[in-house]
Amino acid sequence: MQSSPGQGAERSIIPKPTDKNPTPSRQPLQGENRNTIPKTEDPNQKLVMKKHIPYSLLAAAAACAMAYGDTAYTTPVGYSTQSLIQGFNASGLTLQTPSLAAGALDSVSGTALTDDQLTFTPTAGRIYVLEIVAAANAAAVGTIQEIPAASISGTTITASDDISGLVAAGDRYILRVAPTLEDIFTTVPLATGGVLAAALSSGSADIVWVPKGNGTYDQYFLHSSTLAFRRAGTTTPTPNVPLIYADGLLVQKRTTAAASLTVSGEVKKVGTNSVAVQGFNLLGVVAPVGLNLFNSGLDATLAPALSVGSADVVWVQNPNLTYTQYFRRSGTLVESGWRVSGASVNLTVAQAEAVTLSPGFLVQRRASSSINIGLKVPTSHSSF
């Protein structure tokens, strides 16, 4: 979920495609088939997602359990590793922190969600993510809300938005703590076995770009003297910055030294609803493996058109950190379907299934109106 940057935050706005002097943070140019997120020095890059847990075996195990009539399941856990190389790596949280509370809502009134059985005591200062996992209204499944610890009191959870028109009593939820920069990247510098190259300034260190909404990002780096995260442009530590799994992350790696990002946690069983506004929206796939252009559900809400210049566009990062643009071509004489920018024919089902979504990917929304994007997970995940 995206929100506006806090007061005093350095907001890095990705310049529009018409920018005459692009900075290293510029978005991909409109209408290009392939393009890097521009930079000043990183000609050869790639990002590879490696599957370390055989999730296909987990799916098979789940199927066997159902065949024997078991009715209780535990969510499988594991880890996935994303290789990081020099340049801007589109990353994401493909596995989730464990659920800390779960249950059925007894009442929903405005922003107040009540579970009479809730006994959870939050940690002060942390951000939690509430997710609807089962609901009478199917459109509500996958809805998430960022919940500050102060908004959880007794049996009541106060949502950030009024979702009473979507969520109702009896719907089921889970509550997770949002991981922090420290949780995901650690404060160990790359030189001693960590993930990020630390430095005394953001101009020399690796940078984590965290979406803040409306095309803006906060930049964070690991300070080499204090071994604490700082927001670029500030002189004091910025601890416990929450990372929301619906958002992607850009990891700007400055050196050629090998690095990898390991994400561990639970496999998500249901999809995630996100809001896309006009411009470029960086989203996370939330699934460790198996999500592709065909089964993602993106075709349900993205606006089609006869050309890539008018349609909503999905930018998928390639192994060399360039992007390929995909759009839904509207059909009249020709059947509608996914198409690569610059191509004259639509992708076949098999070809669309072969397009694996990168851990972080961009959705370029053309219209001024925002849309809800229901990003699915592979159907096998519902059996976990």
Image (cartoon, rainbow, N blue to C red):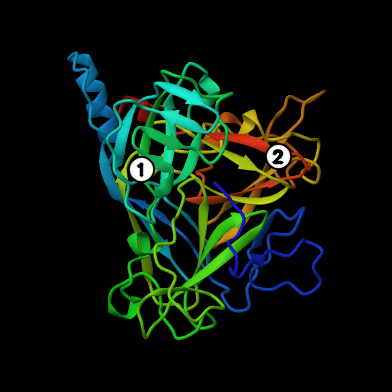
- Determine which of the numbered discs, if any, sits on residue 258 in the image: none
Can you say whether 143 is above or below 108 in the image?
below
Which element carries disc 1, helix, strand or loop? strand
- Determine which of the numbered discs, if any, sits on residue 176 in the image: 1
Task: Please provide percent x and percent y for residue 154.
Answer: 34, 36
Q: Amino acid at mark 1?
A: Arg
Task: Choose between 194 and 150: the one closer to the eye.
Answer: 150
Compared across the picture, whether 350 is left or right of 363 comes to: left
Task: Please provide percent x and percent y for residue 306.
Answer: 81, 36
Task: Please provide percent x and percent y for residue 233.
Answer: 57, 78
Q: Residue at horizontal 36%, vertical 43%? A: 176
**Marks 2/1: CA–CA distance:** 26 Å
Which quadrant of the figure has residue 326?
A: top right
Which quadrant of the figure has residue 131?
A: top left
Compared across the picture, whether 134 is left or right of 109 comes to: left
Q: Earlier in the sequence, mark 2 or mark 1?
A: 1
Task: Please provide percent x and percent y for residue 139.
Answer: 55, 24
Residue 53 appears in the figure = no
Which element carries disc 2, helix, strand or loop? loop
Q: Amino acid at mark 2?
A: Ser
Compared across the picture, whether 229 is left or right of 247 comes to: left
**Within 10 Å of the Cα at label 1, are there few (<14), some (14-19), or many (20+) other Cα atoms?**
some
Residue receiving disc 2: 370
Q: Residue at horizontal 63%, vertical 67%? A: 11
